């Protein structure tokens, strides 16, 4: 919800101080401020209407692994949008609250040309 409404700081607040965001085709970001800048860049590049669906969660003690699928739309400069879908993995650590220590995703579709 935070990403879709442009509240990138709220989305980035889910990341631990040393949490990594590992997007496809971009450099990674570490820590909430860096992740916020990355998410803003992705959102301002046209990514919108992000939906996550958790498929599986495994945990042991203070660590958890979430696997799921995502869908989103990518707005193009000509005013049209292209759908995207793929898979993601999130690694969580309980640091008082559950925080993301790693997030990575990749598309299941061929690259947009």
Image: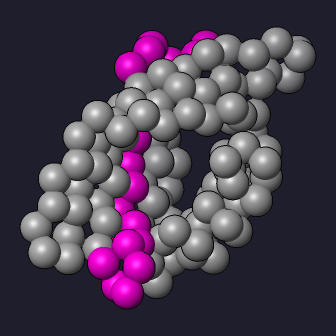
Q: Is residue 100 magenta?
A: yes
User: Where, by quadrant of the figure, is residue 47 drawn?
Assistant: top right
Residue 95, placed above or below residue 76: below
Q: Which residues are magenta?
A: 94-113
Q: Residue at x 56, y 34 (%)?
A: 51
Q: Nearer the viewer, residue 57 or 105?
A: 57
User: Where, by quadrant of the figure, is residue 74 drawn?
Assistant: top right
Q: Residue at x 38, y 49 (%)?
A: 104
Residue 68 appears in the picture as rendered: yes
Q: Is residue 27 left or right of residue 7?
A: left
Q: Give the quarter of the figure containing the C terminus.
A: top right
Q: Is residue 49 left or right of residue 56?
A: right
Q: Main secondary structure of the magenta part?
A: strand
Residue 37 appears in the picture as rendered: no
Residue 81, placed above or below residue 43: above
Q: Residue at x 20, y 70 (%)?
A: 63
Q: Is residue 34 left or right of residue 23?
A: right
């Amino acid at each position: 919800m935070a990403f879709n409404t442009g509240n990138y700081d709220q989305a980035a607040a889910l990341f631990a101080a040393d949490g990594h965001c590992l997007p496809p085709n971009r450099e990674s970001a570490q820590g909430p401020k860096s992740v916020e800048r990355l998410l803003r860049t992705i959102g301002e590049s046209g990514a919108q209407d992000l939906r996550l669906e958790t498929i599986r969660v495994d945990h042991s003690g203070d660590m958890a692994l979430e696997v799921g699928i995502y869908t989103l739309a990518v707005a193009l400069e000509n005013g049209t949008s292209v759908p995207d879908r793929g898979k993601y993995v999130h690694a969580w650590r309980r640091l008082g609250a559950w925080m993301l220590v790693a997030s990575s995703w990749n598309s299941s579709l061929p690259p947009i040309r």
